[in-house]
Amino acid sequence: MAGKLYLCATPIGNLGDITERVLECLKNADIIAAEDTRNSMKLMTHFDIHTPLTSYHEFNKYDKADKLVSRLLEGSNIALITDAGTPAISDPGEVLVKKCQEAGIEVTSLPGPSAAITALTLSGLPTRRFVFEGFLPQDKEERQEIIEELKGEYRTIILYEAPHHLKATLRDLQEAFGERRLAIARELTKKHEEILRFTVREALSYYENQEPRGEFVLVMEGRDRRKDEAQKRAAYEEMTPKEHVEKYMNEGMDKKAAMKQAAKDRGVSKRDIYNALV
Ligand code: SAM
């Protein structure tokens, strides 16, 4: 019978955040696949776990995933852990999960800490709707494309960043989002945990004078829908109802649809538009 893959969330700093289920799973699994086996040894030693470790990281994720799938098909139970947090979030776990699903292997998740959600909840920014971007691409063009996409985003945006890339990322964000509110969550759950709240511009000038140290999550507010709507309304109010309807007809709408849209934009009834036109 095939084994099972267990996605085990591990602490993002404070070892007290490990769950009982994860500890039990790590002790009972046949193998633990870990992103950095040396780093994970500390966790193993602390919790007195002696299960064999094997490495599964960014640079072997495809070949090694195939090998792990073979082991699972032979009946081994494998626990997957990453350096910290929830496997498959901005780490190679995603590839292994996909390959397991394709091979018909059962996968289950033992939930626990994730830096993204921890930072979001502490940010003080809207949490009802959010989007997780992970690390922005290093490639300049790809990065610019994503930033362009994010300009239209109304939801709160969560980004990961390494300390040595933080300033460059803040510089790029500043060009696009200078006055947006930004919460920087640093060293979450650790002794020096700190949440700094700035605008993007202020964050950049802060880190221009201070070397970033530790681990960071950036939580940035999305576009302000109310402000956008007020601006649109102000622009519409500068047009007469006739000009407004004509604008849509010039864009290819028929008269009825153009009147309907103009009425909606101005917050009035279709009859009001009709009356203004005649
Ligand atoms: N899978 C992990 C998770 O669930 O959060 C994330 C892995 S990703 C490779 C590592 C990134 O997570 C770091 O570069 C940093 O942006 C963020 N991170 C991890 N631990 C953190 C912490 N204690 N405080 C702030 N950010 C952290």
Image (spheres, rainbow, N blue to C red):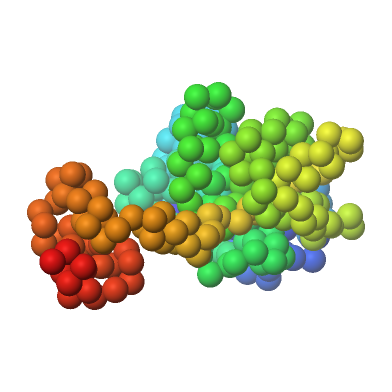
Quadrant containing the C terminus is: bottom left
Report whether residue 87 is seen.
Answer: no
Q: Which residue appears at 47% of the width and 62% of the height?
A: 230
Foreground pick, 123 / 65: 123
In the rendered structure, the answer to whether residue 214 lies left or right of residue 141 reads right
Total tally of numbered discs in the picture: 0
Front one among 24 and 102:
102
Q: Does residue 265 appear anywhere in the picture? A: yes
Looking at the picture, how far across and down is residue 28, in whole percent? 61, 60
Identify the image quadrant of residue 244.
bottom left
Q: Position of residue 218 (x, y in %)?
A: 68, 49
Question: What is the x, y in percent for residue 149?
Answer: 45, 41
**Residue drawn 55% across and 24% down?**
140
Asked whether 6 or 253 is in front, the reply is 253
Relative to 216, is 264 on the left or the right?
Answer: left
> Residue 170 occupies which quadrant of the picture?
top right
The quarter of the displayed image where residue 234 is located: bottom left
- Image height check: is 131 above or below 110? above
* For residue 272, above or below residue 66: below
The image position of residue 70, as x and y in percent, is 42, 40
- Up the image or down, 222 lies above or below 134; here it is below
Work out whether residue 14 or residue 202 is closer to the camera in this orientation and state it. Answer: 202
Residue at 60% x, 66% y: name it. 126
